[in-house]
Structures are given as C-alpha cells and as structure tokens.
C-alpha cells in the first residue's frame, strides 16, 4: 500500500493527502506518480463531485524533494529537471486546471517552491492563518516553475511579483489573501470544518457546469472577445443538455431548491 499519498472518499468528496510529513510533503518521482494517478481516478469517477488536495502535518508542500535531487548528484548524474517537470509536475498542474470538477487546496501550513504553484492551480484555496508562502527557488539558484509565475501575475501587482520572485521573500497567509492568492484564511481550529463546508457546497452544485466554466475561464485569460464568445456558445450548448440544467429549470419554475446530481 502506498503511503506517500493518501486517498480518501467521503460520499461524493475525494481527499488527496500528501503524506510525507517528515520532509514537509516534498515531491519526488514516486509521490508525483501517485498524485497523477489519483487525479486521473477522480477525473473519471462521476460519483466524485469535489476534490480536496492537502498535506499531512505542518506543511502543505515545500516543492521538489531536494534530497531526491541530490541523490542523482551523489551518483555522478545530472538531475533531469526538464523531464521531471514535463512528465510529472506539469501534468499535475494541467490535470488540476482542466479537472471536470472543483478542486480545493486546503493549505494546512507552509507552502514553498513548486508547492506554491500546486496550491495556486486549484480552484479554491483555504489557508490556515499561520501558513507561509515561501519563494524557495532563488535559494537554490533556480527559477520558479509549476506555473507559479502564471498564477502570481494573474493576481498580484507586477512589481510585487518581481519583488517576491527576485528576493526569495515570504508572504504570510493574510498577505496571500490581500493579493487574491487564496480565497479564505481561517484559524487552525476552524480549518477542517471550513474546508469540508466548502467541499459540501461544491458537491451539491452542477458539477458538469463547473468543469465547463473552468475551461471557459482559462481560455478567456489569453484570447480575444470573438473567440471567447465562440467557445461560450459551444460550451453553453453542451451544458444545456445536462440533467442538472433540466433540474435547475424545473426547480426555478416550481420555486424550490434544485437537487443537482452532477450529470
């Protein structure tokens, strides 16, 4: 049984837990293979309508496992950074961003390096008040990866992005909230309850429409108005054929709360 990543399902809510507490949930090849596998699993399981990504212990994720990287150097080998990103980390980001259901980052503690990108690519971010966002790449002579720049620039003022990335500085949870990097900051004793509350809200919404809305949002980031309108028309046609759309219409007409099934 794999212990580096845990997978739990509670009714329609799946939880993926990075379980390397001793190394602050750092990412090596095996961990990322399991993470990719679980993301595939929840993507194709129609019974799952919301996904929670979190870490065990005091950290959400501190990025790539430097001891794992060092093990290559100790053998006289060069660590294949590009391949590690293309085949493992980048696939995780793309799978989360294109997930056909909402993904919540439950940021339970420190998040650093590639862990920042891993958190930011999720759809809804809840952080404990003592969480810190640490730009750790500069400390080891590397540039930000895992789409960190992409998400920072979409939210923070450019001058602040440059300061964060070129000084190796740290943002508190409340600063991350200020710059729209997270949706909510809560006290530790409220954390689990708030995460499950949001997951429950998502699990009762029209899941297909959420997946389509995510696709439209990402497409709209870098496309012109005409192309966005074209995709809107297509995706709206797709959404209109879902059971949830029919249920929503009927509930509106009958003035009752809709009961969506995610279909």
Image (cartoon, rainbow, N blue to C red):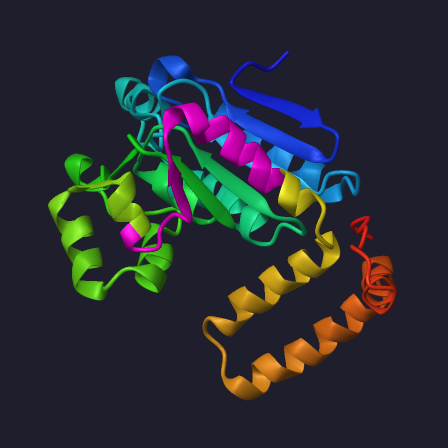
Image quadrant for the N terminus?
top right
Please give the range of residues in magenta: 178-199
- Name the residue located 11 percent from the left edge and 46 percent from the top edge: 167
Q: Considering depth in this image, is 252 or 156 the residue closer to the camera? A: 252
Specify whether residue 129 is painted magenta. Answer: no
- Residue located at (65% from left, 39% from top): 200
Residue 257 position by quadrant: bottom right
Find residue 39 and report its horizontal and vertical position in percent: 62, 38
Q: Is residue 185 above or below residue 164?
A: above
x, y percentage for residue 182?
Answer: 38, 47
- Residue situated furthest front in the rendering: 255
Q: Write down the quadrant of residue 33 in the picture.
A: top right
| Residue at the extreme left | 167
Is the residue 12 above or below the residue 259 in the image?
above
Q: Nearer the viewer, residue 49 or 144?
A: 49
Is residue 150 shown above or below 224? above
């Amino acid at each position: 049984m794999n212990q580096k990543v845990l997978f739990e399902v509670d009714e329609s809510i799946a939880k993926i837990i990075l379980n390397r507490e001793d190394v602050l949930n750092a990412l090596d090849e095996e961990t990322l293979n399991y993470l990719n596998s679980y993301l595939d699993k929840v993507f194709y399981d129609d019974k799952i309508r919301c996904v929670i990504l979190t870490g065990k212990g005091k950290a959400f994720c501190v990025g790539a496992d430097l001891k794992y990287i060092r093990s290559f150097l100790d053998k006289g080998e060069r660590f294949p950074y590009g391949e590690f990103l293309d085949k493992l980390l980048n696939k995780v980001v793309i799978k989360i961003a294109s997930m056909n259901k909402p993904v919540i980052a439950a940021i339970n503690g420190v998040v650093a390096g590639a862990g920042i990108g891993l958190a930011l690519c999720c759809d809804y971010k809840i952080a404990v008040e003592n969480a810190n966002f640490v730009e750790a790449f500069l400390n080891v002579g590397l540039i930000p990866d895992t789409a960190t720049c992409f998400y920072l620039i979409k939210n923070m003022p450019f001058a602040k992005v440059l300061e964060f990335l070129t000084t190796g500085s740290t943002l508190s949870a409340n600063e991350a909230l200020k710059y729209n990097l997270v949706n909510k900051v809560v006290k530790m004793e409220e954390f689990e309850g708030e995460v499950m509350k949001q997951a429950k809200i998502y699990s009762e919404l029209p899941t297909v429409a959420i997946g389509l809305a995510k696709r439209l949002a990402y497409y709209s980031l870098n496309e012109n108005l005409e192309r966005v309108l074209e995709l809107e028309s297509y995706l709206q046609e797709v959404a209109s054929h879902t059971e949830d759309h029919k249920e929503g219409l009927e509930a509106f007409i009958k003035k009752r709360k809709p009961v969506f099934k995610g279909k």
